Image: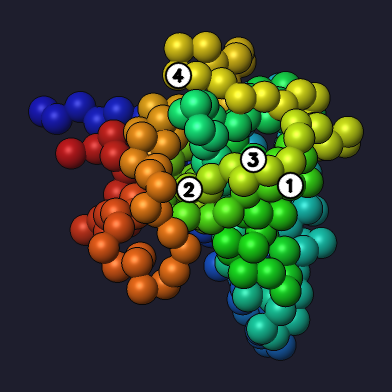
Amino acid sequence: MTMHQNPSSVELVRWAEALAGIARTGLGFTQNPYEVERYEEVLAVAADIRAHAEDDDSRLTADDFARGWMKAVGTGTLGYVTPKVAIGAIVGNDAGELLLIQRADSGSWLYPTGWADVGYSPAEVAIKEVREETGIRAEVVRPVSIIDGMRAGFSRVPLYSLVFLCRAVGGQLAHHPQECLDVGWFGSDSLPQPLARGQWAEMAFDTLATLTDRDCVGATELHALECRFDAPRDDVWRSSSRP
């Protein structure tokens, strides 16, 4: 007899957020009261799963999740639920060091990152986040990563993470007083603690090792450069703990 493992907390969160997204999108488009009732039931089931998956100190209840999701229900196209977009920047200097910030919300260290802003391209957001959070002026070299944060396990909010390799070109270190506790340049053998969760540090330094004076910005260059992304799965919703 094949023994099946229970799904992980990461999988439960992913399933719950997917169900909640379907229900909220349905509520945003339907005007049929019967369908409204069904979508609200789906949302309640998703909230139960989401609350059961919580393994941190948030102690949010199913009602907390359901109320929060209902507040975010829109109408029509604005009600279509999609992942948020986070933009990150792996910034290197001439010494091969990595620019890191200590996040004010968690106290952990990570490369500069923030939510995408309306009116900016992804690369423009990367430059803006670096300047605002660290005081460093940077130029974008190329994209290095386009991944699903929930699938990678570092986010419990549906988001896509777009990360760019950047080169520092000026400025002085000065951390943002509200968003950061500290900022600095670090080598691979002198990383500060605690680091943000996820297997990103080795990838960041491997990426910095490819930074050369020949690198330049330009859409014509991008087709020849590698960019990490999530490979499509044959069965998106099947638990990874099951055969």
Residues at marks 3 and 2 touching, judged by CB atoms closer than 8 Å: no
- What's the residue at 62%, 29% (across, down)? 100
Which amino acid is tagged 4? Ser
Disc 1 to disc 4, how far (Cα)?
23 Å
Element assignment for label 4 = loop
Residue 48 appears left or right of 235 = right
Label 4, on which residue?
Answer: 188
Tell me which numbered mark, 2 or 4, is placed earlier along the sequence.
2
Residue 165: image tag: 2
Residues at marks 3 and 1 touching, judged by CB atoms closer than 8 Å: no
Label 1, on which residue?
Answer: 131
Display colour scheme: rainbow
Disc 3 to disc 4, how far (Cα)?
17 Å
Q: Give the image location of residue 146, x and y in percent.
A: 43, 55
Residue 210 is at least partly visible in this image: yes
Number of residues whose C-alpha sits closer than 10 Å to that of mark 1, classed few (under 14), some (14–19) or many (20 or more): many
Element assignment for label 1 = helix
Residue 53 appears left or right of 116 = left
Residue 220, above or below 148: below
Which amino acid is tagged 3? Pro
- What's the residue at 72%, 26% (across, down)? 183
Which amino acid is tagged 2? Leu
Residue 172, above or below 150: above
Which label lies toward us, 3 or 4? 4
Tell me which numbered mark, 3 or 1, is placed earlier along the sequence.
3
Q: Give the image location of residue 9, x and y in percent.
A: 48, 32
Tell me which numbered mark, 3 or 4, is placed earlier along the sequence.
3
Residue 205 appears left or right of 130 = left
Number of residues whose C-alpha sits closer than 10 Å to that of mark 3, classed few (under 14), some (14–19) or many (20 or more): many
Which label lies toward us, 3 or 1? 1
